[in-house]
Image (spheres, grey):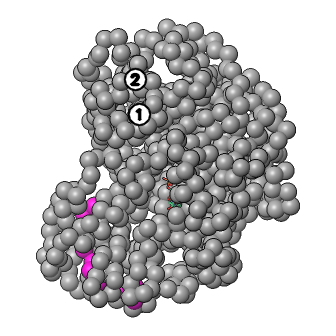
C-alpha cells in the first residue's frame, strides 16, 4: 500500500506545536538529541547519575558478548532505596507517593515516609519467610498499594518478582510460578471489579497445588470475603508485615542483579519470561518518565491507568515515577464503575496533571460519548500519554479535544515488555506532533525501519521496526532460555533487535507503527496492515472500534475481515456495511476493502487491552457467514467466547 494512504488518513495536514509555556520550562529540549547523537554512551552515563548508587559505575556498556548486554556493570545500588528512602532523606517524606482510589470509593493517601515504613516492614517479613537475594517471588494482586509495596520489598531484598495479572487462570499462574521457580506467592483474598468482590486466592490455591517448591502464600486482606487457609503455608499480610520493624537497611546489589521477570505470551505456546535487571532498567525508566511526561515532581499529579501486571504498570507506576519522587494516583477498578465518568471524576478529585492511558480505553470513552468527560473539570491536565497499540488519528484527535481541552500535548509512546521502557515517542516540549505517529526514537535510542533484507528503507518506505543499538533497559534474556532470546529477537536481522512490529517512515522520517508483523495481511500479493484498515474504519462516523484480520481465501490468498463496534446511534444495515467498505476503499484504495464486515458488541482483548486478532481469525475462518446484517451480535461473541482459551492464558 502506498504511503499516500497515511496522508489520506490525515486528510488535512494536522500538526500540533508544543504549547509555548510548556516548551519554555520543559525538562528536556531539542539539544538532548544532538547530545546523545554525539556521545550515546556518555549520554546514558549522565542519565545513570540521576540514581543514587552505593558504588558509582565506571563502565557504561559492555557489549562484548552480544546480544547479552551489561550496563553500568561495576555499579551497585538498591532499587527500592532509589524509589523510596532517598526521597525521605532529601526532606520529601511528607510528599504523597500514592493517592489510592479503591473501586468501592475508599481512598487513602500514602506519603513517601509511610511508603518507606511499609516497604521496610514487608522486606523484613520476606526475610522472615525465608526469601533471600536471588530468589523469585510471584505476585498476584489487584491494583492496591500492597502490590507496589510487595514489588519494592522484593527489590529491596534482591528477590526478583514475577507479577501475574490478577484474573489469569490457575493454570496460567501455575505455569508462570513453575517456570520462574518461585518459592513465595503474594496474593489477596480478592479485589473489587465492577462493583463486586472478586476472589483471587482460590486460583492461587489451585495453582500452588501443582507447584511443590512454593513454601508460603502471603495473603493481603482486601475484600474480607471468606478465604480458605492452609495452615503452615498461608500467612496473612497484616499479621506478619504488621508486626515487623520499620527499620530495614537496604543492601546494595550489582547493577546487573535481576529485578523482575514478566511473562509475555509467545506466538507459539510457552510464555516468555522477560528478564530485567536493576541499574540500566531503572536509569531508562526514570529518564523517560521525567523526559516524556515533563514530570515536575513538586507540582505534578501523575496517573497511569495501566494494571500493575502489565509492563506499563511496572515501569510507569512503580519504578519510573517512584524513582523520580512523583505523586501519583492509583485506581483499583474499571472505568465504568459505578458510572462511565469515573476516570474524569478521579482526574477532577486529585487535580491530575499527567494522564497515561491506552488507545483501547480512549476509543471506549469515545463510544460512551463526549458529554461524559464534559461534565468534569479536567483543566488540571497538561500532558497526555498513550501506550499499548497504535493510536488511530481519530482517537488521538478526540483525546486531545475532549480530554486535553485542545491544549495538552499527546505523547504516543512505543515500547514493549522487552524494551523495559519507552523507546519511540514525541517529547512534549520539543516535538511538533502528528496524530497517529510515535514519531522518533528518544535521545540515546536507535530505531529505524528496514526491508526484508535488513536494509534501512528511505523516508516514505515501509517494513519492519528494528532497534539498532543496545539500550539500558533492554531485556537481558528470556528466563532460562538464552537460545530462544537469540532466536526470537536477534536472528532475523544481523546485529539488530527485531521488535516484531511493522512500521513506516513518512516523508519527514517520522515513524508510524503498523501493528504486529504476524497480523499483516497478504491480499492478492499486497501487504496490508491491520492497523491501517482499522484506522480507516474508525475514521467513519458510525464506527467506534474495529478489529481487522486476514482470513484464508481461495482466490486472494487472504481476505480482509473486519469486526466493528458501531457507535451508539448507528444501526447495522446492509447499506451501512456497503458504505463502510466504500469508505475504506476511498481512503486506502480498492485492494484494502474488507471482504466482510461484521458488527459486534465487543472485541476480544487481552488484559492490557490489545485485541486478540488470532481469535478473530479463527472465527473468520471457521464460520460460513451468510448475510452479515442478520448476524446476531451475541452469536458472534458466543462463537468468539467458545474459541477463547481458558481465561488468562494470554497476556
Ligand atoms: C508497553 C507495551 C508491546 C507491543 C508492541 C506494539 C504495541 C505498544 C505502542 C504499540 C504502536 C504504540 N505497542 N505501544 N504500537 N504504538 N505507542 O505495550 O508492552 O504489552 O509488551 O506490548 O504493543 O505492537 O510491540 P507489551
What segment is highlighted magenta in the picture?
Answer: 591-602
Q: Position of residue 231 (x, y in %)?
A: 31, 11
Q: Quadrant of residue 363?
A: bottom left
User: How many badges with numbers are in the image?
Assistant: 2
Residue at the (64%, 49%) spot, across then down: 474
Q: Nearer the viewer, residue 220 or 365?
A: 220
Question: Image height check: is 441 above or below 152?
Answer: below
Q: Quadrant of residue 429?
A: bottom right
Residue at the (53%, 87%) spot, across then down: 2
Is 334 part of what is drawn in magenta?
Answer: no
Residue at the (53%, 57%) spot, across then down: 488
Label 2 CB-ligand 1 distance < 8 A: no
Q: Nearer the viewer, residue 103 or 212?
A: 212
Q: Which residue is mark 2?
A: 214
Q: Position of residue 10 (x, y in %)?
A: 54, 80
Circles 2 and 1: CB atoms closer than 8 Å? yes
SS of the residue at dot 2? Answer: loop
Question: Image height check: is 32 above or below 600?
Answer: above
SS of the residue at dot 1? Answer: helix
Q: Which residue is mark 1?
A: 177
Q: Nearer the viewer, residue 344 or 200?
A: 200
Q: Position of residue 448 (x, y in %)?
A: 66, 69
Q: Is residue 247 left or right of residue 35?
A: left
Q: What is the CA distance from the residue labelled 2 to the residue labelled 1? A: 8 Å
Q: Is residue 203 left or right of residue 456?
A: left
Amino acid at each position: 500500500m502506498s504511503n499516500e494512504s497515511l496522508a489520506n488518513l490525515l486528510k488535512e495536514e494536522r500538526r500540533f506545536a508544543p504549547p509555548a509555556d510548556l516548551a519554555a520550562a520543559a525538562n528536556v529540549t531539542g539539544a538532548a538529541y544532538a547530545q546523545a547523537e554525539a556521545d550515546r554512551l556518555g549520554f546514558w552515563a549522565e542519565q545513570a547519575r540521576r540514581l543514587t548508587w552505593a558504588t558509582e559505575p565506571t563502565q557504561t556498556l559492555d557489549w562484548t558478548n552480544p546480544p547479552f548486554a551489561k550496563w553500568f556493570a561495576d555499579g551497585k545500588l538498591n532499587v527500592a532505596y532509589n524509589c523510596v528512602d532517598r526521597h525521605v532523606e532529601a526532606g520529601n517524606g511528607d510528599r504523597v507517593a500514592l493517592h489510592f482510589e479503591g473501586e468501592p470509593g475508599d481512598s487513602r493517601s500514602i506519603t513517601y515516609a509511610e511508603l518507606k515504613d511499609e516497604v521496610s516492614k514487608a522486606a523484613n517479613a520476606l526475610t522472615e519467610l525465608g526469601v533471600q537475594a536471588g530468589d523469585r517471588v510471584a505476585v498476584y494482586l489487584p491494583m492496591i498499594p500492597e502490590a507496589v509495596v510487595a514489588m519494592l520489598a522484593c527489590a529491596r531484598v534482591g528477590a526478583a518478582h514475577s507479577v501475574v495479572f490478577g484474573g489469569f487462570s490457575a493454570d496460567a499462574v501455575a505455569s508462570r510460578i513453575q517456570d520462574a521457580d518461585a518459592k513465595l506467592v503474594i496474593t489477596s483474598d480478592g479485589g473489587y471489579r465492577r462493583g463486586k468482590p472478586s476472589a483471587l486466592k482460590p486460583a492461587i490455591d489451585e495453582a500452588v497445588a501443582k507447584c511443590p517448591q512454593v513454601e508460603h502464600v502471603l495473603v493481603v486482606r482486601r475484600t474480607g470475603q471468606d478465604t480458605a487457609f492452609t495452615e503452615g503455608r498461608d500467612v496473612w499480610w497484616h499479621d506478619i508485615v504488621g508486626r515487623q520493624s520499620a527499620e530495614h537497611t537496604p543492601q546494595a546489589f550489582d547493577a546487573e542483579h535481576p529485578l523482575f521477570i514478566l511473562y509475555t505470551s509467545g506466538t507459539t505456546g510457552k510464555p516468555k519470561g522477560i528478564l530485567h535487571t536493576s541499574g540500566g532498567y531503572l536509569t531508562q525508566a526514570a529518564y523517560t518518565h521525567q523526559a516524556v511526561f515533563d514530570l515536575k515532581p513538586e507540582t505534578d499529579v501523575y496517573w497511569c491507568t495501566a494494571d500493575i501486571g502489565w509492563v506499563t504498570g511496572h515501569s510507569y507506576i512503580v519504578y519510573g515515577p517512584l524513582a523520580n519522587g512523583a505523586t501519583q494516583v492509583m485506581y483499583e477498578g474499571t472505568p465504568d464503575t459505578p458510572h462511565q465518568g469515573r476516570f474524569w471524576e478521579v482526574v477532577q478529585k486529585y487535580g491530575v496533571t499527567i494522564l497515561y492511558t491506552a488507545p483501547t480505553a480512549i476509543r471506549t470513552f469515545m463510544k460512551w460519548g463526549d458529554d461524559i468527560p464534559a461534565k468534569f473539570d479536567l483543566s488540571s491536565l497538561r500532558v497526555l500519554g498513550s501506550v499499548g497499540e497504535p493510536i488511530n488519528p481519530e482517537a488521538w484527535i478526540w483525546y486531545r479535544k475532549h480530554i486535553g481541552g485542545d491544549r495538552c500535548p499527546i505523547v504516543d509512546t512505543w515500547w514493549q515488555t522487552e524494551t523495559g521502557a519507552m523507546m519511540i515517542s514525541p517529547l512534549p516540549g520539543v516535538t511538533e506532533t502528528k496524530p497517529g505517529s510515535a514519531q522518533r526514537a528518544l535521545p540515546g535510542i536507535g530505531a529505524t525501519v528496514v526491508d526484508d533484507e535488513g536494509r534501512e528503507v528511505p523516508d516514505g518506505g515501509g517494513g519492519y521496526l528494528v532497534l539498532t543499538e543496545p539500550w539500558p533497559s533492554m531485556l537481558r534474556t528470556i528466563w532460562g532460555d538464552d537460545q530462544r532470546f537469540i532466536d526470537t529477537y536477534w536472528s532475523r536481522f544481523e546485529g539488530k533487535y527485531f521488535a516484531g512490529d511493522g512500521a513506516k517512515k513518512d516523508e519527514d522520517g517520522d515513524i508510524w507503527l503498523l501493528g504486529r508483523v504476524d497480523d499483516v495481511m497478504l491480499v492478492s500479493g499486497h501487504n496490508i496492515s491491520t492497523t491501517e484498515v482499522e484506522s480507516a474504519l474508525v475514521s467513519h462516523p458510525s464506527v467506534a472500534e474495529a478489529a481487522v484480520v486476514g482470513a484464508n481465501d481461495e482466490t486472494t490468498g487472504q481476505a480482509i475481515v473486519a469486526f466493528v463496534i458501531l457507535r451508539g446511534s448507528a444501526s447495522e444495515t446492509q447499506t451501512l456495511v456497503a458504505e463502510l467498505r466504500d469508505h475504506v476503499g476511498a481512503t486506502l484504495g480498492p485492494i484494502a476493502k474488507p471482504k466482510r464486515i461484521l458488527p459486534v458488541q465487543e472485541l476480544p482483548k487481552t488484559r492490557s487491552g490489545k485485541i486478540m486478532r488470532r481469535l478473530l481469525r479463527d472465527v473468520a475462518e471457521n464460520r460460513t457467514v451468510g448475510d452479515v446484517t442478520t448476524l446476531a451480535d451475541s452469536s458472534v461473541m458466543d462463537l468468539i467466547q467458545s474459541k477463547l482459551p481458558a481465561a488468562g492464558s494470554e497476556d
